[in-house]
């Protein structure tokens, strides 16, 4: 039978052994990496988690393994950190009393790197001298990457031109970016915690309830075009994309909404629609005009040669006007430019052109250009442009007619052969007399005077743009020039009054 002292000693030894087993078990099961070093920095022990993070298993007590079991260390800024300069070395030499939550980067044998947070405490002997240190560290690589991604996404969200908003399943706003503030006028501190319904016009409240219902079912709403209300009460066209937000268990907890201002696009679409309609209208008008020119030129021509020559000149005039309209993006054409191009082949020293700066709208430009073309062609064949000494006096001015001023254009041929009225009204005469009244609601006076053809056009102001001072200094009419019916009625009315 064992002596009582021996029995007690065995009991103590067994208890110590069991304690070491429990310690080792706990040490190896700890989710945090732990290792210790002696006073010289030699690694004395480490747990399984430390070996996992290092990616290797250094031999405890190996004098070549000092301060840290990692293959290589790097500082947070990416610079290389020798083991003898690592935090464990600083603690063991007494340079620092300990380390709390310091960041370090570990490179493992396979070349991968992880980010760890380090906590180091020195171990002291009974004399207060450092006899070693314990390092507890844990992997934060995933957390750091998530934080970087989060910051990156937050930067994208804040710099986005689109309004990006999150809300819970009841429509309460939980986040609000700068784009939302620019689009809707509310600042984040004002709107967060309030209902999304502050952005919904009264007639679209049911629409938002439907969207929230879809979100609760986990459905996404893509590129839904609608109208929302700004802080100042104005309405804005937006395109919405609304996606459900889930918690860690997969339950829908809210929605992310992206709202894009499509006002400019809507305006562009409407402008494009109007342009297409205008183009369709203009093409039909041009084709109708061409058809009428062909038919009437054919009726007025006695020979095939006359038909071809007349048609060629009229088509050329029409094309010239269209070129001018196209250059001006169909906003109108300068009357002076129409005259300059029409007179270019014929103008003589006795030709005079005078008038203020005016722009004829597209429809008026075509009509006036065709009338002037017929007058010019006739003058080149039979009138003022047919002799070296002849010419044309052309002028235009604003008429004062009640509260608005119409545009008067006066044509006077001079120095040409004597003129006799034509036996029948040809195509050119018909165009001059009927086109302006029919197309523009204006008036025309055409006189085949012996001294030269005279013609006066009056164009309603609605077809003309430009400075219109309604000057009282209206040029006097040439003596014997026939007054237009509108002008004559206005003057007669003034005389009676």
Image (cartoon, rainbow, N blue to C red):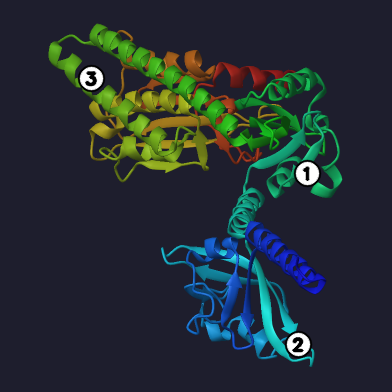
Residue 315 position within the rendered picture, expressed as x and y whole percent measured from the top left: 27, 23
Q: In the image, is 258 to the left or to the right of 111? A: right
User: Circle 2 sits in a helix, a strand or a loop, which is it?
Assistant: loop
Q: Is residue 347 above or below residue 90?
A: above
Quickly name the residue at label 2.
125
Structural crowding at the residue carrying mark 1, measured as other residues with C-alpha within 10 Å and reported as few (<14), some (14–19) or many (≥20): some
Q: Is residue 298 above or below residue 207?
A: above
Residue 435 in view here: yes
Q: Choose top left, top right, bottom left or bottom right for residue 23.
A: bottom right
How far apart are the alpha carbons under marks 3 and 1? 65 Å
Q: Which of disc 1 and disc 3 is earlier in sequence?
A: 1
Q: In the image, is 487 to the left or to the right of 330? A: right
Q: Is residue 296 above or below residue 344?
A: above
State the residue in front, 46 or 399.
Answer: 46
**Which residue is rendered at x = 59% and y = 55% of the image?**
142
Quarter of the image with the N terminus is bottom right
Quickly name the residue at label 3.
310
State the residue in front, 147 or 38.
Answer: 38
Residue 257 position within the rendered picture, expressed as x and y whole percent measured from the top left: 68, 35
Residue 453 in view here: no
Quickly name the residue at label 1.
185
How far apart are the alpha carbons under marks 2 and 3? 121 Å
User: Circle 3 sits in a helix, a strand or a loop, which is it?
Assistant: helix
Residue 174 position within the rendered picture, expressed as x and y whole percent measured from the top left: 79, 41
Structural crowding at the residue carrying mark 3, measured as other residues with C-alpha within 10 Å and reported as few (<14), some (14–19) or many (≥20): many
Q: Which of disc 2 and disc 1 is earlier in sequence?
A: 2
């Amino acid at each position: 039978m064992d002596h009582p002292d021996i029995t007690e000693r065995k009991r103590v030894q067994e208890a110590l052994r069991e304690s070491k087993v429990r310690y080792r078990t706990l040490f190896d099961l700890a989710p945090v990496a732990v290792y210790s070093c002696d006073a010289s920095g030699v690694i004395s022990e480490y747990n399984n988690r430390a070996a996992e993070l290092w990616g290797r298993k250094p031999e405890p007590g190996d004098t070549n393994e000092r301060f840290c079991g990692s293959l290589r260390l790097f500082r947070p800024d990416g610079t290389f950190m020798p083991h003898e300069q690592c935090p464990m070395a600083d603690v063991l030499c007494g340079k620092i009393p300990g380390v709390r939550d310091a960041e370090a980067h570990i490179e493992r044998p396979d070349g991968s790197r992880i980010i760890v947070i380090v906590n180091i405490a020195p171990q002291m002997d009974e004399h207060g001298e450092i006899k070693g240190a314990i390092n507890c560290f844990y992997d934060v690589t995933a957390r750091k990457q998530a934080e970087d991604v989060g910051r990156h996404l937050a930067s994208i969200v804040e710099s986005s031109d689109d309004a990006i908003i999150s809300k819970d399943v009841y429509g309460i706003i939980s986040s609000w970016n700068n784009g939302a503030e620019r689009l809707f006028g509310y600042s984040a501190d004002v709107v967060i915690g309030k209902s999304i319904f502050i952005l919904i016009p009264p007639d679209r409240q049911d629409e938002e309830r439907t969207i929230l219902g879809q979100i609760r079912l986990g459905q996404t709403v893509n590129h839904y075009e609608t109208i929302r209300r700004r802080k100042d009460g104005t309405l804005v066209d937006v395109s919405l994309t609304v996606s459900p937000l889930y918690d860690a268990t997969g339950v829908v907890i809210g929605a992310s909404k992206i709202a894009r201002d499509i006002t400019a696009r809507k305006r562009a679409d409407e402008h494009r629609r109007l342009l297409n309609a205008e183009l369709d209208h203009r093409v039909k008008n041009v084709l109708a005009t061409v058809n009428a020119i062909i038919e009437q030129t054919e009726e007025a021509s006695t020979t095939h040669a006359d038909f071809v020559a007349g048609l060629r000149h009229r088509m050329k005039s029409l094309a010239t006007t269209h070129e001018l309209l196209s250059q001006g993006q169909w906003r109108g054409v300068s009357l002076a430019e129409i005259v300059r191009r029409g007179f270019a082949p014929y103008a003589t020293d006795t030709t005079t052109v005078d008038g203020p700066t005016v722009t004829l709208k597209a429809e008026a430009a075509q009509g006036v250009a065709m009338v002037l073309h017929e007058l010019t062609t006739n003058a080149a064949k039979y009138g003022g442009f047919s002799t070296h000494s002849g010419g044309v006096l052309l002028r235009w001015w604003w008429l004062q007619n009640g509260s608005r001023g119409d545009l008067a254009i006066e044509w006077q041929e001079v120095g040409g052969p004597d003129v006799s009225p034509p036996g029948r009204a040809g195509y050119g005469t018909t165009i001059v007399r009927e086109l302006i009244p029919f197309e523009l609601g204006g008036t025309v006076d055409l006189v085949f005077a012996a001294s030269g053809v005279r013609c006066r056009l009056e164009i309603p102001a609605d077809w003309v743009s430009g400075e219109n001072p309604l000057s009282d200094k209206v040029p006097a009419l040439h003596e014997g020039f026939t007054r237009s019916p509108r002008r004559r009625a206005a003057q007669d009315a003034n005389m009676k009054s």
